[in-house]
Amino acid sequence: MEVNLFVKKIKKVRDRQRIKKLAGKILLAGMLMLALLMIGLSVWALRITSSNKNLEQKISLTKNKILELQDVESKQLYLVSKLSSFANLLKLQKRHQAVAETIFNMIPDGTTLQGFEVNEKGTIDLSGSVIDWSKLFELLRRIKEPAAGQLGVAQAQVNRISFGKTGTINFDINIVLSGASQ
Amino acid sequence: MKNKQLIMMLGAAIFLGIIVFGPALANLQKVIRVNKQQKTELSSLEKKLQILEGIDKAMVTERVTKMEAVFPSDKPIVELLSSLAQLAANHDLSFGGVSLSPGSLTDEKKEDSLADLTFGFEVGGELNSILKFLQELERVAPLMKIDKVGLTIRTLSMIAAKINVSAFYQPAPKSLGKISQPVKLLSRSEEAILSQLFNFTQFQAVLPSVQTGKTNLFDFGQ
């Protein structure tokens, strides 16, 4: 009967060899996988680079088309840039027209207007002369009760009433119309 | 020996991985970023092109011409005097006594800032004509606002009115900006405001028509 004293050792060596072989295979497979991954990444990068070139061409083409329409763009930009100020001026003008209309409607026939000025606070300085007392009373009545559809009077102050050399009556009145300020 | 080979191979694989994959991944990341940027840029440019193609050329030109007449980009001295003289003539009024201070002839104002030009003048004639003149004054191009009115009776039928007005102007933008900058379309309310431009009466002003030098994109003339 033969007794092998190295059985255990041989088995250990064989196991180690097997593990080494397996590790080698795994490493090889891993490297192969990495190589494939590398190829995949390169193909992907190439495709994206090609897509970028296409996009670049499209961008260039679109930019050229936009440049051809530069005239329209500059006109549109011009209109947009002026629109806000123009809208504010229109509002200001409408308010101003309403003030002027109200003042002209207040003045009775036979009145000479020497000054009509709207200051920054919205106060209207109205000065002039009327031919007689009845016209002055009519003017004061119209200031007190403006005609329908006109701006209302928020405040009115008679600064001066005096007689002129020719019998005319001079007046100087400050008026604040509601909605006339700004 | 085999163990050493295995370790060396593993080391080589990791080293190669870092050397090769590092730049490859960085390059891929870069091209992806560029791709995204280009897609965004193309999208905004296409949108802008679509908007520009949708704008009615004739209408925008007409509006700009009218805007330039009503709310000019430069001090409207010639146009103003011409309009006032013609409006006065339409109402059989004498026109004169113009006093204006045009101020600086250079563009001292900031871009897009509103500016005004104040001046005074005198008209003479019948009271009704003067009142009609005053009513129409603020509906005449270029846009102006009456600041002060003084009426003086010279004879029973002859009245002189001293009028101070402010005319407004605003310099046009100096450049279009970046090509990728979007174009703003007008809203309905803004369209309505623009339509009011056509309510202003415009008188023909005599102006030199020869243009020399570099082309100004915002010089639309009148």
Image: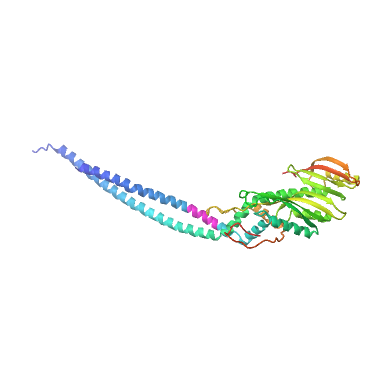
- Give above or below for B220 relative to A120: below
Residue B112 lies within the magenta run: no
Range drawn in magenta: B39-49
Q: Which residue appears farthest toward the bottom when viewing the image?
A: B210
Which secondary structure is most common in the magenta stretch? Answer: helix
- Location of the C terminus of chain B by quadrant is bottom right
Judging depth in this view, the residue of B145 and B214 nearest the camera is: B214
Residue B74: x percent and y percent? 65, 54
Residue A13 picture quarter: top left
Q: Residue at x 35, y 47 (%)?
A: B22
In the image, taking residue B112 as reference, residue A26 lies left or right, namely left
Residue B48 lies within the magenta run: yes
In the image, taking residue A163 as reference, residue B122 lies left or right, namely left
- Location of the N terminus of chain B by quadrant is top left
Report whether residue B85 is seen.
yes
Q: Residue at x 15, y 38 (%)?
A: A7
In the image, taking residue B44 as reference, residue A159 lies left or right, namely right
- Give above or below for B191 relative to B8: below
Q: Which colour scheme is used?
A: rainbow
